[in-house]
Amino acid sequence: MEIFEQLGIDGRVLAVNAAAFLLVLYLLNRLFFKPFAGFLLERSERIRQQMTEAEQAREEARQERERMAAEQERQRAEFKRQAEEQRRLAQEEARRIVEQAHRAAQERRRHAEEKIARQEAALRQALRAETAALATGIARKALEETLGPEDRAKSVENAVRQVEQLAEQSSF
């Protein structure tokens, strides 16, 4: 302690100052450093937890974006498939309508041709009958003028029979 005396330091004062320093150090540690360190530790734990939660939220958001993108792609594919199906159905319907119109036109044409054929047959029959009647009348007059009364009657009857037979044969 001689060194302290030579330096002019009182040992008791040094001991009291050392004790006071240790007491202040203890009190600072107990009242300030430990609570402050606890606060910092708690704060750092909250920040770490918030960072973990933020990372989880980012990961969930990424997964949700991927899920939504996949769903959007699935919906696009479904829309495209439905559009193709509707296009195919419309083409089939158009083809069916055209075929139906074609069949209806063919049926109308067939009916018209049958009607024309019936009318033509009726006109031919009427023409034959009229031709036969005219030929009979002309033959009768011609024979009456050239033949005598007795021969005329026989010839007219024979000619009329022959023309009528011809008319009947041509109508079949």
Image (spheres, helix red, strand yellow):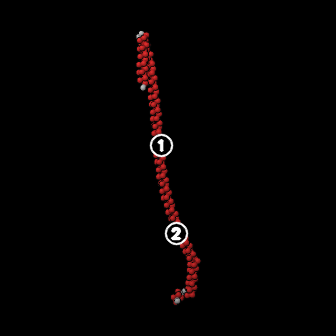
Label 1 sits on what residue type? Glu
In this rendered view, identify the residue nearer to me: 117 or 92.
Answer: 117
Q: Is residue 81 visible?
A: yes
Name the quarter where the C terminus is drawn: top left
In this rendered view, identify the residue nearer to me: 89 or 135.
Answer: 135
Above-or-below relation of 14 to 103 = below
Above-or-below relation of 48 to 133 = below
> Which residue is pictured at 57% across the width and 87% down the height?
12
Residue 120 percent across, percent down from the top left: 44, 26
SS category of the residue bearing label 1: helix
Label 2 sits on what residue type? Arg
Residue 118 percent across, percent down from the top left: 46, 28
Check disc 2 and report the residue beneath it: 48
Residue 163 percent across, percent down from the top left: 42, 19
> Which residue is pictured at 43% across the width and 16% down the height?
157
> Looking at the image, is mark 1 or mark 2 nearer the viewer?
1
Horizontal side, residue 117 vs residue 16: left or right: left
How far separated are the C-alphas under marks 1 and 2? 66 Å
Residue 93's tag is 1
